[in-house]
Amino acid sequence: MSEHIFPGEPPPRPEPSSASRERQRPEFSRFEVYDGRPDGAIPLPGAFLVLGSMIGVGLALGFVAGFVGRWFYLMLVYPGAVGAGIGAAGMWAIRVGKVRNPLFAVAASVLAGALAMLMIQYAYYLHFMDRVRLEQPALAPLLDQGAVSLIDFIKLRAKEGISIGRPGQGKGTNLGEIGTYIYWAVELAIIIGLAWLLTIDEAGQPFCRRCNSWKPMQVLGVLAFSKEEAADILRGGDLTRLASPNPATIADAQISAAICRQCGTEGLLNIRLDWLSVNKKGEVSAKKIMQCIYPGHALPVLEDAIYPRDS
Ligand SMILES: [Zn+2]
């Protein structure tokens, strides 16, 4: 069986006249398959929106975490909240700004996460400067001249080492200088990682370039094939194979599709195949196996192939 998946999306087709539409009956046997990678577009206003909101939220939450941190700091929890906040802002901005570039989402996550982490330190730094001015007024002119920079302060804090331990149980264990840097690296990874995880998928959602709008992904149902068979059929484009399922297989492949509301079957059909598995608790989880793009008129064929449910 020949398998050929074209990269990206097919080129835009000319609008067919009503006469030619009549002649070109859709061929249900074989379709050209495209891999359906996002087109990578970053509209300029969208780029500013994504960067502005992710960095803005990162700086604001970073400051709050560092400010509250002078009284109590919840390790791993605060960075988690900062990362989730940056990610949520990014998801919103990607959608509104129509950014279809997962790499850009990653870059924005790294930048916003690093600045947020720096802001946490900056809030501590401000507190430190205030305390020194209050406790040792003689040093105030020196501080005004910029004797202790933010970087100096961070190095100082690391040298002193931060302590971990349960709240209210004394000083806890000091991590030491290296341990402190490692801990900060973990925090940075949490912030960036969460923002990254939340935004990368959002920027890879199906999009109709003709209408300049996102296409909502909807579950069609389960195919009467194993996940390997279903993936093989979809990659090959020969959908006649869907007509003859093997009754012995376990149907564990769920198919979802996204079609443009305006273009309908005249547009492109984004398809995603998920592997459905049930864990010991009886919870069903879906894991993406593959995605591809078909011409829109493949939708009725796929809908016909959905496994009848017994309910
Ligand atoms: Zn459209």
Image: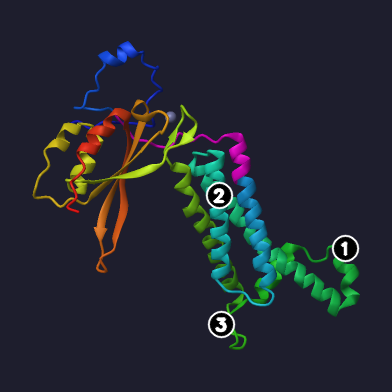
227 w.r.t. 145: above or below: above
Between the residue at mark 3 and the residue at mark 1, the CA separation in whole angstroms equals 37 Å
Q: Residue at x 69, y 74 (%)?
A: 70
| Disc assigned to residue 90 | 2
Which mark is first along the chain, 1 or 3? 1
State how many labels appear.
Answer: 3
77 w.r.t. 259: above or below: below
Instruction: Please name the amino acid that badge 2 sits on.
Output: Gly
Farthest residue to the bottom: give it.
Answer: 170
Give the class, few, some or many, for how many residues have Cα within 10 Å of label 2's Cα (few <14, many ≥20): many
Instruction: Please name the amino acid that badge 1 sits on.
Output: Gln
Label 1 CB less than 8 angstroms from ligand 1: no
| Disc assigned to residue 145 | 1
Between the residue at mark 1 and the residue at mark 2, the CA separation in whole angstroms equals 38 Å
| Disc assigned to residue 263 | none
79 w.r.t. 198: above or below: below
Residue wearing tag 3: 165
User: Closer to the camera: disc 1 or disc 2?
Assistant: 2
Instruction: Kindly check if marks 3 and 2 are in contact, taking CB atoms under 8 A apart as contact.
Output: no
- Taking the image as shown, residue 43 lies to the left or right of residue 306, namely right
Expressed as whole percent of the image width and height from the top left, the position of residue 47 reads 60, 40
**Range shown magenta:** 33-50
Q: Quadrant of residue 72?
A: bottom right
Q: Quadrant of ligand 1?
A: top left
Q: Quadrant of residue 143?
A: bottom right
Between residues 259 and 78, which one lies in front from this camera angle? Answer: 259
Expressed as whole percent of the image width and height from the top left, the position of residue 98 reads 53, 38
The answer, for residue 115, to whether it is visible in the render is no
